[in-house]
Amino acid sequence: MPQFPSIETLKNFKVVFWDLDNTIYAYEPAHQAALKAALKEFSELFEADANTSKEYYAVARAEINKRLHGQAASHSRLLYFKEMIQNVGSSKISKAVNLEKIYWNAFLKHMKMNEEALDLIKKLYENSIPMAVITDLTTQIQLKKMKHLKLEKYFSLIISSEEAGVEKPNAKIFKMAMSKMKVKPNKCCIIGDNIKTDGGGEPLGMKVFII
């Protein structure tokens, strides 16, 4: 079973990059709780049962993902809910704003830190090893997650796919992160959960640790 690298191993690098979702905290439990809360509201607003609401969400998500593939906006819950409302034939498009708020409020409430990750982050911080986050999704919510998890003091910066204009594993986002941290590929590493995405820096010479 994959494990976090040791602090002794990480001392060999000038900068340690981290993935956020499913690496520093568990994504799925928070997502399921958030989706349940938002779909409950959707069901009440548009008189749809729970299963129908889930189907509307799945269809809307697929449509947005297909339309905006490779862009941070492809993960936008606001766009998902807006698409859902349009698909039920309602003109109450502005309700999407409240549905998004319900979703993310519930998401943040149910986030749980990976304690092993936190322990390693603290050790790196104590050893004065600079850290930064490379993450997909939009900047605003990723910053909210960092604040909610009380991680801001440990990280020098966070690079999102929204500001890079591309998602992992596109090399551009990794190059942007290294440029901002002023570090060469062979002097840094990334800790993540998915080799297909977080491994995007490997062809550049960045060491990748998958947990």
Image (cartoon, grey):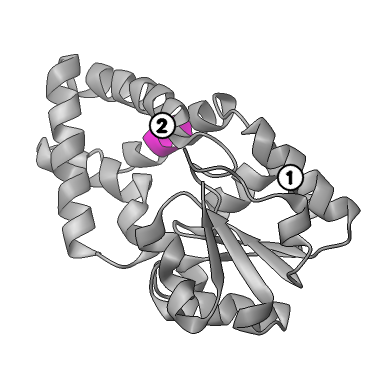
Q: Disc 1 residue type?
A: Leu
Q: Is residue 48 visible?
A: no
Q: Disc 2 residue type?
A: Glu
Residue pictured at 46% horizontal, 67% vertical: 162
**Residue bearing the label numbered 1:** 120
Q: Position of residue 141 (x, y in %)?
A: 54, 49
Q: Nearer the viewer, residue 176 or 5?
A: 5
**Residue bearing the label numbered 2:** 28
Residue pictured at 46% horizontal, 36% vertical: 27
- Please say if 194 is above or below 201: above
Q: Earlier in the sequence, mark 1 or mark 2?
A: 2
Give the dominant element type of the magenta stretch: helix, strand or loop: helix
Q: Is residue 137 visible?
A: yes
Q: Nearer the observer, disc 1 or disc 2?
A: 1
Left-right relation of 123 to 28: right
Left-right relation of 62 to 158: left
- Please say if 210 is above or below 32: below
> Circle 1 sits in a helix, a strand or a loop, which is it?
helix
Query: Is 140 a magenta residue?
Result: no
Q: Residues within 10 Å of mark 1 (few under 14, many from 20)?
A: some
Residue pictured at 84% horizontal, 53% vertical: 125
Highlighted range, magenta: 98-102
Q: Position of residue 136 (x, y in %)?
A: 45, 59
1 and 2 marks in contact (CB < 8 Å): no
